[in-house]
Amino acid sequence: MRADRLVSLVLLLRQRGRMTADELASELEVSARTVLRDIEALSTAGVPVYADRGRHGGFSLLPGFRTELTGLNHDEALALLTAGSGRGKKVFGLSTALASAMRKVVDALPEGHRASLDEAARRFLVEPETDLLSRRPVTEDMASGVMSEVRHAVLTGHKLRFHYAAPAKTPHWHTVEPIGLVTVRDRTYLLATKAGEDRTYRLSRMLTAEGLPELAERPPQVDLDRIWAERSARFLSENHIPVIVRVKPSRREELLNAARAVRAEEPEADGWVRLDVTFEDLRHAVWAIWQIDTAAEVLAPESLRAALRDRATILAARYDGISREG
């Protein structure tokens, strides 16, 4: 909404000082022409914003245009600023709204309080783009507009229609009663019902989505923790292979990224980690464990141990023969 954008524009100028139209446009995700119209509207409304001409010019506010929010203590404000940093700000497609909210919180703090918090927040880094092994996290792209449509249907309680591409299947349309959104390890899922049956859909597999005018049939109250736990337990019990495996800590995350689900985890005395994980089927499990090379050891089931042993035996014989010929 334009009113929210005007407030964000004022807060940007208060917190950063002079900014050009292009800089403001980039922050607000609008065009420079829109920024100029907003500046004119603010001036007309009596907001003390003025333009500096020249190569180093831009727009500025006269000092003193602010309110103070004194109800937050240091740790409360620091928690808000830290939560708004890093990859977490992209959850549920609310990054722009969160950035706007953070600007309002920071601007409303007393001057001395704000300066110390800004320095403190720089000392915390939440979910960086790479880990210590320089591996980038697995992120899923969503088709344009999908998140906003799904989020709106969830919040307003309307039915949702979307085109869904499940793995190895032809995409087709679904009409569902949305219940809630859950994000787990950077994957976002829609919990819904379809024809009275529980359904879970990954948003990255939605090709397009649209909210419908009909109201969804769903209970007025929802316990997403309970629903997610129940659906996770059901998922683990249906058509999947449970695996107990030991893995070196340096390869743990790689194995977890390949697994469909994690049932349990505990450290072992020799420094390795024991994992109880689930794979799609035997073929998926063999592929995933094989990628870890000698840094993993399957303890169960015996069918997976046998499949890995057979593959290793074939490869050993093949390359042993090449060695003798050389």
Image: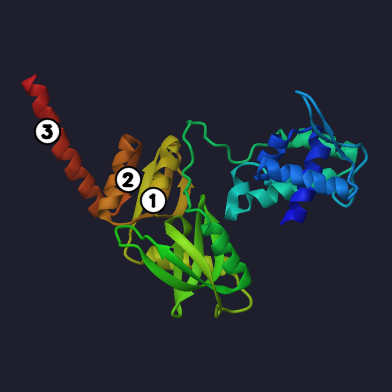
Q: Amino acid at mark 1?
A: Ala
Residue 105 is situated, as x and y percent measured from the top left of the image, at 80, 48
Sequence-first tag of 1 and 2 = 1
Q: Which residue is mark 2?
A: 288
Q: Residue at x 92, y 36 (%)?
A: 63
Residue 292 is situated, as x and y percent measured from the top left of the image, at 34, 38
Viewed as shown, does residue 182 lie left or right of 85? left
Label total for image: 3
Local packing at callout 3 (Cα closer than 10 Å; few below 14, some 14-19, many 20+) is few
Task: Depth check: give the residue in front, 100 or 83.
Answer: 100
Q: Is residue 298 visible?
A: yes
Task: Classify mark 2: helix, strand or loop.
Answer: helix
Q: Is residue 155 above or below residue 75?
A: below
Local packing at callout 2 (Cα closer than 10 Å; few below 14, some 14-19, many 20+) is some
Viewed as shown, does residue 278 lie left or right of 265? left
Q: Amino acid at mark 3?
A: Arg
Residue 76 is situated, as x and y percent measured from the top left of the image, at 79, 48
Q: CA distance from mark 1 to mark 2?
A: 8 Å
Q: Is residue 22 above or below residue 186?
A: above
Sequence-first tag of 3 and 1 = 1
Q: Which residue is mark 1?
A: 259
Q: Which residue is mark 3?
A: 318
Name the quadrant of the N terminus.
bottom right
Viewed as shown, does residue 180 lie left or right of 35? left
Q: CA distance from mark 3 to mark 1?
A: 29 Å
Q: Are marks 1 and 2 in contact (CB under 8 Å)?
A: yes
Q: Amino acid at mark 2?
A: Ala
Sequence-first tag of 2 and 3 = 2
